[in-house]
Amino acid sequence: MEEALFDTTQVTRSPGKLAAPGGRVMLALALIVLSGVFTACAKPADPVGGDAGVVRGNELRVATSYDELYEALHEAEYDAYAYAGGSSREVAPMEDAVSGSGVFADSAQAPTASADSGASGMDYSATNVQVEGIDEADIIKTDGENIYVLANDELVIYAAQGSDTHELSRTPLTSLGYPNELFVADDRVAVITGSYSSIMPFDGTDEQAGILLEQSNTSVILFDVSDPAQPQQKTVLAQSGSYSASRLQNGVLYLISDYWIASELDPDDPATFVPLIVSGSELTRLAPDDICILPQFSAPHYAVAASYDFATGEKLDAASVLGGASTVYMSPDNLYVTDSQYTREEGEPYTDSVYTVVEYTEKQTTQIVRLALDDAGGLTLAAQATLDGRLLNQFSLDEYEGNLRLALTREEYQYRTLTDESHDVESYQYIDQEPVTNSLIVLSPELTWLGGIEGLAEDERIYSVRFTGPVGYMVTFRQVDPLFSLDLSDPTQPRVQGELKIPGFSTYLHPFSEGRLLGIGYNADEGVMEDVKLSMYDISDPYDVSELFAESTGLSYSDALYDHRAVLVDRGQNLIGFGGDWSSNQYLVYGYDDEAGFVQRAHLELVTDGDEYWISSRRGLFIGENLYVYTGTRLEVFNLTNFERILTLTIF
């Protein structure tokens, strides 16, 4: 195996065993309004440029043996049971490590039949995407002729023919767990499922042999749908862990899962603590040098990333991050896996009256690992760094000209523990909280500091971010909505060039047309959220932004606020569509122009049964002259001109 070391300029690997991360984990702190698992951290490395502690040039620690992985996991498992505050008299139970079937964190999108939301001139819409040309999965897809939906544990395919829309096939999916999302491309459908069951190789028949280990796993059932009336199962892919995220680019499927160790660790049996990959009848265990170990992690789990040929299901490559992943972002050239971690810095104990006092500082950090991609689907562990602060979601990251831009919110809490040993009493006391601030950081391909803006919007937090080439837009909120315009043309000197303050805030920003930025968010008065609103920002001068129009929708909530896949935007059709409140049966369609502003084109009342009080998700797409709205139980067809209902199909 090749030897090398990671410094600020290159990745190498060092022979021998590295020390496992130390410290103890705090599971709960009642007097601090925080939740999650806290971990004590070692003294951070010197920052790689910028203010102290903002970016730490941590060594990319690639495992050299299964023994090293076992030792790191063993210590993390111990940490997960440790009692917060330095006392061993009580032990807090570790949260159930098994998340069940199909838990996923990173909302997704799809390839771009109309990836620029109408600019392409295609006659059907695709799922809303973050990065053009990189598909992300969803519960409904179309190839312009047929509609593919996941409903009631089945893959249902419809011929999309307006008033003659009809069901072509219905395929049960429950044998491999709960279906989450799907991809459609080139006469293939990939259905992503999740379960807690045995991982078994697939031999092309109904017989599956070789039960290996019961654990949470993510499977992909690959179908040939060249005849959509008779889908043919081609193969099954599987990997350890519950579903986290996925991407599809240039015929390669990238699948990311979060694998929590639920079994007792056996140092002599890597099957108890190393992720597995299944491609058809081939089963492989990740090699140590395909796994990197994060400097800090609070529980025994991995982020598992694997690439597969979308046409055949063949496994191309795999890599893993011991320490998990909370947010995933992919550019054409790199996959970024990030983990959010609460860290604790512990002061020296001192005596006050009958108490032994220890002071602590808690803050959140983000650990990033870059996996380099190649045209053949290769995944190479390339760089790692740790930053102070937390990301909002995948839109908080963006790669431009090889550099990574990140928007983070930074919080810091201070408290002390007071222990009276003679009476076996321990209490907590809040000390102080530093003001919440926000930052924009630019990192090199080696994830070293290039430049940054810190201290933005004190006592506010980030609610949405969108990057467009050399410009970034960031929305923070507390009382009013500052929309910051960021000049990122010089990565070493990013600058705030504009700030727009209006009531309310946007949780999603979408480039709408040349010089226009769409915002979906909330009206707000003195910090109190009101109804959902649409905003159209004039960004013709990206550094002098103004709000041209705002439209109150009357909705108290929409899934479009936090799931960009639920937003249908097409300039060519002048469509802005999204579902209404969770408990309602509405789908709203707006148009926009610079003279009239937002115009409600339709307020569609969707069909429901009398006992249906909750619609979990809605998706809208158009094909030709028709709008199709999917509610999870029905597919409804409307005329795209007058929005008259043409057809209602009950799925189950």
Image (cartoon, grey):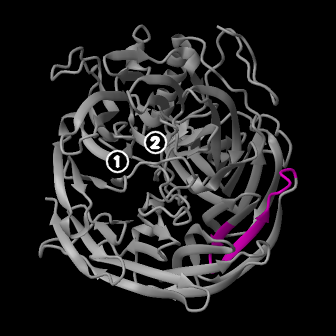
Up the image or down, 204 lies above or below 375; here it is above
Quarter of the picture containing the C terminus is bottom left
When asked about the image quadrant of residue 17, the answer is: top right
How crowded pointer 2 is (Cα within 10 Å; few <14, some 14-19, many 20+) is rated as: many
**Image location (x, y in percent) of residue 312:** 38, 27
When asked about the image quadrant of residue 198, the answer is: top left
Q: Is residue 491 magenta?
A: yes
Up the image or down, 360 lies above or below 24; here it is below
Q: Nearer the viewer, residue 644 or 357?
A: 644
> Residue shown at 62%/52% (left/top)?
390
> Residue shown at 36%/16% (left/top)?
283
Can residue 349 be seen in this snapshot?
no
Q: Is residue 519 magenta?
A: no
Q: Earlier in the sequence, mark 2 or mark 1?
A: 1
User: What label does residue 246 carry, if any?
Assistant: 2
Predominant secondary structure, magenta span: strand
Element class at badge 2: strand
**Image location (x, y in percent) of residue 376:** 56, 26
**Marks 2 & 1, CB-CB < 8 Å contact:** yes
